[in-house]
Image (cartoon, rainbow, N blue to C red):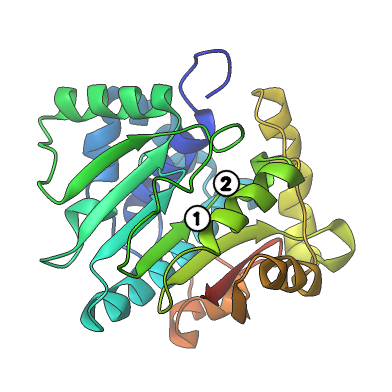
Amino acid sequence: MRDAQPSQTALMAAAARAAHLLVDDEPHLFRDTLAAPLLGALAEKPLEYHRAFGDHVVLAGTRAQVTARSHYTERRAAESAAAGVRRHVVLGAGLDTYAWRARPGVHVIEVDHPGTQGWKRDLMAAAGLDRPSRLTFTPLDLETGDLTALLAGDEPAFVSWLGVTMYLTGEAVAATLAALGRLPAGSEVIIEYALPPALRDERGTAYAEFAIEAAAERGEPWLSFFAPEDLTALLKRHGLEAVEHVRQEDCVEDALWRRRDALRPGDMCRLVRAST
């Protein structure tokens, strides 16, 4: 949220998940069948762009990014739930729809700016989407708020933090990691982060030239970038152990990248899986 306006980043991410099912060939990297209904009329213009210019590096790149990261993260969430972890926290949830897909017995806690959550509730009401009984909305601005009390408890948690760290200051990222590092043993955290320019591949660089400028123009500039080894050290400083860093290409099975459409993996953002 900027100046009380709905998050354009959250809107574009949801629109890209919706567009993936309309523009790209099967097999799909990820199926979010609720993104379009949730957006309602707000989906019309973004979906027109994806249909008309879907091969453009920034549109195809956005679809690849949001679907690949969700594929990996929800696979880890399912494995976590199967292992008995019932508390799943979505930081900076935006218009995420995982709560409607989560396994029975899982309690999903969405943490986001109160304005974004109010906007999402309005969209849910307009779409006729009832709040799942397993979903709790917890309002918090990650740039200025403290997660510690919200994460308190004796049970381990699975935490996803996708598409957010690049929009926060380094201080806010560190404060959030400090809170996550206090989670009980057995907790798992999936974090998406942006690479500095020198570490991006050719496709990641081409995507960044458009995406970062567009984000700044809509009032949501990218502020934080991490080399994998630097983020590993920062995680360790706050009580988290990096298990693996995952490139977009490795978020899904190799066969899913053997495609005839415009989806190609790029290396501008990666995921890190960490544990307490």
Residue 264: horizontal and vertical position, in percent?
A: 59, 68
- The numbered mark at residue 224 is none
Residue 96 visible in the shown view? no
Q: Which residue in the protein does label 2 denote? A: 164
Say left or right for 265 vs 97: right
Say left or right for 151 vs 132: right
Number of numbered discs on residues: 2
Disc 1 marks a residue whose amino acid type is Trp
Q: Secondary structure at mark 2?
A: loop
Q: Is residue 260 above or below residue 268?
A: below
Q: Is residue 181 above or below residue 216?
A: below
Image marks 1 and 2: residues in contact by CB distance under 8 Å: yes
- Asked which quadrant contains residue 230, the reply is bottom right
Point 43% across, 77% down: residue: 185
Q: Secondary structure at mark 1?
A: strand
Point 76% across, 41% down: residue: 223
Say left or right for 124 vs 88: left
Residue 70: horizontal and vertical position, in percent?
A: 41, 62
Point 32% across, 23% down: residue: 118
Q: Which residue in the protein does label 1 denote? A: 161
Residue 82: horizontal and vertical position, in percent?
A: 22, 81
Extreme residue in the top direction: 3
- Asked which quadrant contains residue 114, the reply is top left
Q: Is residue 125 above or below residue 168?
A: above
Q: Nearer the viewer, residue 46 or 12?
A: 12
Point 38% across, 76% down: residue: 76
- Asked which quadrant contains residue 198, the reply is bottom right
Residue 98: horizontal and vertical position, in percent?
A: 28, 55
